[in-house]
Amino acid sequence: MKKIRFVLPALLYFVLFSCGEIEEPVNTIHIDEDVLPNPTIIEESSDFAFAPPSPLEIAAFFKQAGLTYDPAKLNPAANKDRYQTKLKKSVNFGVYATDLATCVVNNKISDAQGYLEAIQYLAEEIGMQNIFEQSTISKFKRNIGNADSIEGILTQIQVNTVEYIELNGKDDLEVIYFAGAWIEGMYLGTLTLMEQDSKNIVQQLASQIEFGNRIAKGLESIEDQDPEIKFVRENILEIVNYYKDCESVKNLTEEDIDLGRIELTSAELNSISTLIVALRTDMIK
Amino acid sequence: MMRLNSKFKILTLILVVGALVSFVPDQKGDKKKKSSKSGLDAASEFKSQVAGYRKDCKAALKPYRYSFGRTTYFNYKSYNTLKEVEVALILNSSYKFTFNAEGVTVDPIQVKVYNKPSNYNKRILIYEKNSASGGSFEFTSEQLVEKMKEHYKEKGLSDYELDKILLSKVYIDYIIPAIDEEFEEDSETGRRKVVTKRGAIVFASGYENLNMED
């Protein structure tokens, strides 16, 4: 054993230095460590790092794209009493936010009032009553003839909602509310497609479908994964994955997407619409 | 009997004193939690300051109409970190994006905006601010689309195709630089712990609301 201890280092010494001085390989690259960029570590935000368009913008887009106003297309405000679970209340808070915006951009203010009351009711039910100032409803009634002021009131509710969520760390509530607004936005988008044959709507819808991924991620990060949350998440993912697997989408390059070259076939659009309508029907019942 | 009684009294006294001591507020802890004159702990005080920055950020959107706001909180670490915010846009709408960096109180952060998320290799850098700390800054969606056009023009696309460029989403990356860690003694455990240095950047988006009045 002692011999090995002596022989091994001697052998290593011999191997290393018997060939004379070790020459540096010709193609060595010298790296100055000071000029190396600092590696950036991507940190998954604990918060829901997503900024969606406001319901007013979504509603205005579909109106401009040619969606005709019909109260039958919206979730009746009277349904507000049906929702018993926190998920259903929060999802429909988002659904109604989009419906309210749809009424306002179409200047159907008397219908809008019902939706405003429904939102206020659900906000109280989910502990977000603070987003409504005491005077909101009376201010709304005073401005019934002034669409711009009504839009201003809606914008203020949006500001208050974002502020409430940020101050109180209600990320869980936020993602469910967005899920509701997303579902209703997608639903109105499919209705617009049925009425109008516009390429622009397909681009917007395609872009909106992709937001679904972010919402599904947000839903996944909710600690209390009850079956209702799982159901919504799985259904949103089904829509997103169906879209991604469409033949018309699979082979698109990034350049195609940037240049608005998405063209879905009627069959693909019908299948996506069916999935959206099924999820929306389930959420509002 | 007398001896037993006095022993019982001493025992009772010890228990009462013990109970009282356990209910005396932990002044060290209290001092730590309520560090400010307002009685708020440092984190809450910072949050309420940031609420003020949010108002400023929203006000800077004028004349655009508020669409959404997002505050990103971060802690400086001993390595660079990145936080990303995905912003969804309505196609062909005109947006203004405002930022308030008053909450960036330690080292300046970098703000980079791309057309794709950070897991894409070939994303296009459409806005960058290398040193955001204090103050505010802003840009519009038109500026971002121009950058996209420049990128594709270099690739040889025709003007006809360049006019079709769509910006449906943007990704705001906040790159928080590494700092040298500082340590302090934990008043509760007596152990050495890293001093948390936090920061926040506020973002708001607004859209141009030029619809014809009915």
Image (cartoon, coloured by chain):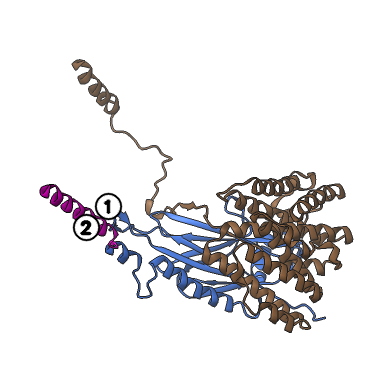
Q: Position of residue B132 (x, y in %)?
A: 48, 69
Give the x, y percent position of residue A26. 41, 39
Are the residues flagged by discs 2 and 1 from a single subunit? yes
Disc 2 from disc 1: Cα separation:
29 Å
Q: Amino acid at mark 1?
A: Arg
Give the x, y percent position of residue A206.
75, 55
What range of the chain is rendered magenta? Answer: B1-26
Asked if the residues shown at circle 2 and circle 1 are in contact, with their CB atoms under 8 angstroms apart, the answer is no
To which residue does mark 2 refer?
A: B17
- The residue closer to the viewer here, A36 or A184, is A184
Q: Position of residue B71 (x, y in %)?
A: 53, 66
Q: Which residue is mark 1?
A: B191
Is residue B93 at all visible to an observer of this figure? no
Which residue sits at x=26%, y=56%? Answer: B19
Queried whether the magenta region covers residue A36, the answer comes back as no
For the residue pair B114 and A270, the one nearer the viewer reads as: A270
For the C terminus of chain B, the image quarter is bottom right
Three-letter amino acid code at disc 2? Val
Q: Residue furthest front?
A: B1
Of all residues, the one furthest to the left in this rendering is: B3
* Category of crowding for the residue at label 1, using alpha-carbon neighbours closer than 10 angstroms: few (below 14), some (14–19), many (at least 20): few
- What secondary structure prevails in the magenta region? helix
Q: Which chain is brown?
A: A
Chain in blue (letter): B
